[in-house]
Amino acid sequence: MREGLSVDLDQAPPVSVRSNAIAALELRDLERAINRLPEDQRTVVLLIGLEGMRYDRVAAILNVPIGTVRSRLARGRAELRRLMSAGQAVQAQQAFAPGLGPVTVRQRAA
C-alpha cells in the first residue's frame, strides 16, 4: 500500500464528472460542415475565424481584394449556419420520429 491517506470508497465524497459528449458532437458536426464548404469559403472562414487573421492580411495571402474576403466570409458563415441547423433538424427527427423520411430545412423568405 502507498503511503498517504486511505479512504474507503463508501466514505469518499462524490466526484462530479460533466460529460463532454454534446460538445464533442457539436465540434464533429462543425468540422463536417466546414469540410462541406467550397474551398475558397472554407479557407477564409478558417483564416479569419480560427486563426484570427485580419481581413487585409487574408486578402494579401490569397491575393484577392478585401471585398472578396468579406463576401466569401459572409457566404461561408451563412452556409455554416444552414448546414448546422439542417444537422440539428436531422438529429431531432431521428430522436423523435425515426420512422419518418429525411427532413428538409427551408429558409423563410425575408
Image (cartoon, grey):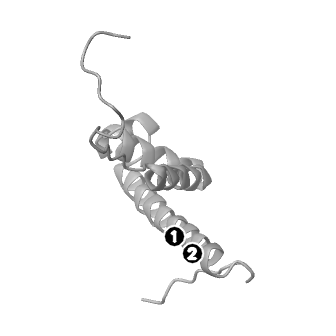
Q: Quadrant of residue 57?
A: top left
What residue do we see at 48% from left, 49% from top?
Answer: 24
In the rendering, which numbered label is found on residue 92? 2
SS assignment at label 2:
helix
Rendered location of residue 22, percent (x, y): 46, 56
Rendered location of residue 44, percent (x, y): 44, 47
User: Disc 1 and disc 2: Cα gap in Å?
Assistant: 15 Å
Q: Earlier in the sequence, mark 1 or mark 2?
A: 1
What residue do we see at 29% from left, 37% from top?
Answer: 12
Rendered location of residue 70, percent (x, y): 37, 56
Q: Is residue 97 above or below residue 78?
A: below
Q: Amino acid at mark 1?
A: Arg
User: In the picture, which quadrant includes the C terminus?
Assistant: bottom left
Q: Which residue is mark 1?
A: 82
Q: Is residue 81 left or right of residue 67?
A: right
Q: Nearer the viewer, mark 1 or mark 2?
A: 2
Q: Is residue 60 above or below residue 38?
A: above
What residue do we see at 53% from left, 49% from top?
Answer: 31
SS assignment at label 1:
helix
Q: Amino acid at mark 2?
A: Ala
